[in-house]
Image (spheres, rainbow, N blue to C red):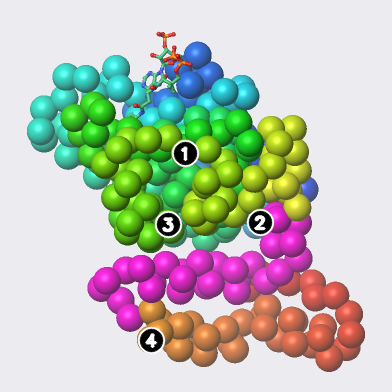
Amino acid sequence: MVATSEFILSEVKNGVLVITINRPDKLNSLNKQTIEELHETLVEAENINEIKSVILTGAGNKAFVAGADIAEFANFSIEQGKQLSSIGHFKIFNFIENYSKPIIAAVNGFALGGGLELALACHIRVVAENAKLGLPEVSLGVIPGYGGTQRLAQIVGKGKAFEMILTADMINAVDALKWGLANYTTTQEELLNKCFEITTKIASKSPTAIKTAIKVINAGYNNKLNGFEVEIEEFGKSFGTADFKEGVSAFMEKRKANFSGN
Ligand code: COA
């Protein structure tokens, strides 16, 4: 149903789309083609009602994603560098953050540079015990360019973000959990099960309300918007949805809600 491409594997399991970035010989680093294919997969899945949430992971047990493909940008000019960042933001990182269905990063190994930025753009992160997370860009003479300077600080606070970005140090899963970068840590073997545990909870809820909650939480981090005002507006709109009618009726009738997503 959702097409699989050269570097992106897709599988739908019980309403969950599992996307695997599949370039293990290059530690799943993000080249142009992978970014394009990932974008296309997400676009396709957004209109499939059966898909309630997405789990994003990397092939193999060594890396989630080891960053942008360094070989590909090695000779870029200033203009090309700017384009790389802005296309990435548009097609993947902002796209994921504002996706209408929850996306969980199953961080199964190295999440470095663009790989950590990818996990940061996801709504929830579950991190395997063997994972190493970091933004090593300053070692290469660049800065994080896929939202890392902004989202890392939003998630772990400015102090830890400064430390991680300026030292380029990798942190382990224990510190990631302590710092709020990981929602959970698990063994490598249990990683997807832990993600499915979360997606199962989401699956029984109103897709309309979930979509709106993502929008409103993100509004609070958009300095062009007032999150509280967006919340008031969207809260009001919820009362006009079929999901609201169903959710409240189900509660009154002491039965499980059967949401249509409208
Ligand atoms: N871009 C392109 N290729 C990458 C890559 C990246 N970000 N990360 C890893 N690879 C490639 C390596 O070049 C190597 O390819 P080769 O076998 O054709 O030489 C292959 O993936 C395996 O990586 P290797 O470095 O041999 O594995 P390792 O276990 O020795 O080291 C890392 C693992 C993650 C520490 C190391 O690969 C690394 O530092 N990668 C770059 C991380 C980074 O700086 N990311 C931010 C980019 S902005």
Give the CA separation, mark 1 to mark 2: 31 Å
Question: How far is the residue under mark 2 from the one under mark 4?
Answer: 27 Å
Kindly identify the amino acid type of the residue bearing the numbered disc 2: Lys
Residue at numbered disc 1:
171
In this rendering, position of residue 148 left or right of residue 216: left
- Disc 4 designates what residue? 229
Most prominent secondary structure in the magenta stretch? helix
Which amino acid lies under the numbered mark 3 shown in the image of this protein?
Val
First in residue order: circle 4 vs circle 1: 1
Q: Which residue is mark 2?
A: 52
Q: Position of residue 64 (x, y in %)?
A: 53, 32
Give the CA distance from mark 3 to mark 2: 28 Å
Q: Residue furthest right?
A: 254
Q: Which mark is residue 156?
A: 3
Residue 24's place in the image compared with 144, above or below, is: above
Query: SS of the residue at dot 3?
Result: helix
Q: Is residue 213 left or right of residue 141?
A: right
Q: Which residue is located at x 64 percent, y 67 percent?
A: 207
